[in-house]
Amino acid sequence: MEPMPLPHFLILIAAVIVAAAVTLWFAATKGVPFAALALAALIGAGVVRLMARVE
């Protein structure tokens, strides 16, 4: 497997940061409490972790 080229990696990082900013902005404009958003993110991360377990 070849390593990821640096420009692709930097674009990926920038896309993740922009997506996070848009998500926070959208939640703030709709009045969603940040605590609820954080709880949803934690629950989602836990579900993904449980689904990715290899035994």
Image (cartoon, rainbow, N blue to C red):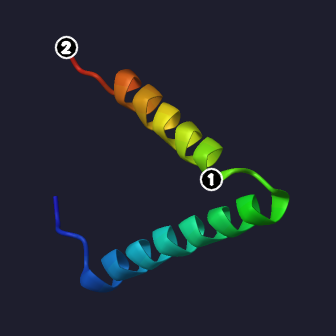
Q: Nearer the viewer, residue 30 or 1?
A: 30
Classify residue 39 by image quadrant.
Answer: top right
Q: At numbered mark 2, what does the secondary structure look like: helix, strand or loop?
A: loop
Residue 55 lies, with reference to residue 26, above or below; the image says: above
Label 1 to label 2: alpha-carbon separation: 35 Å
Q: Nearer the viewer, residue 2 or 7?
A: 7
| Mark number, residue 8 | none
Residue occupying the far bottom of the picture: 7
Residue type, mark 1 in image: Phe
- Asked whether, in this view, residue 1 is left or right of residue 46, the answer is left
Q: Earlier in the sequence, mark 1 or mark 2?
A: 1
Residue occupying the far top of the picture: 55
Residue 15 lies, with reference to residue 43, above or below; the image says: below
Q: Which residue is mark 2?
A: 55
**The N terminus sits in image quarter:** bottom left
**Mark 2 surroundings within 10 Å by alpha-carbon count, few (fewer than 14), some (14 through 19), many (20 or more):** few
**Mark 1 surroundings within 10 Å by alpha-carbon count, few (fewer than 14), some (14 through 19), many (20 or more):** few
Decide: marks 1, 2 in contact (CB < 8 A)?
Answer: no
- Asked whether, in this view, residue 43 is left or right of residue 22, the answer is left
Residue 19 point in image, percent of width and height? 58, 67
Residue occupying the far right of the picture: 30
**The C terminus sits in image quarter:** top left
Q: Which residue is mark 1?
A: 34
Q: Residue at the location (37% across, 22% down)?
A: 50
Q: Residue at the location (35% across, 30% down)?
A: 49
Q: Residue at the location (73% across, 63% down)?
A: 28
- Asked whether, in this view, residue 47 is left or right of residue 32, the answer is left
Residue type, mark 2 in image: Glu
Residue 24 lies, with reference to residue 11, above or below; the image says: above
Q: Nearer the viewer, residue 54 or 3?
A: 54
Residue 44 point in image, percent of width and height? 51, 35
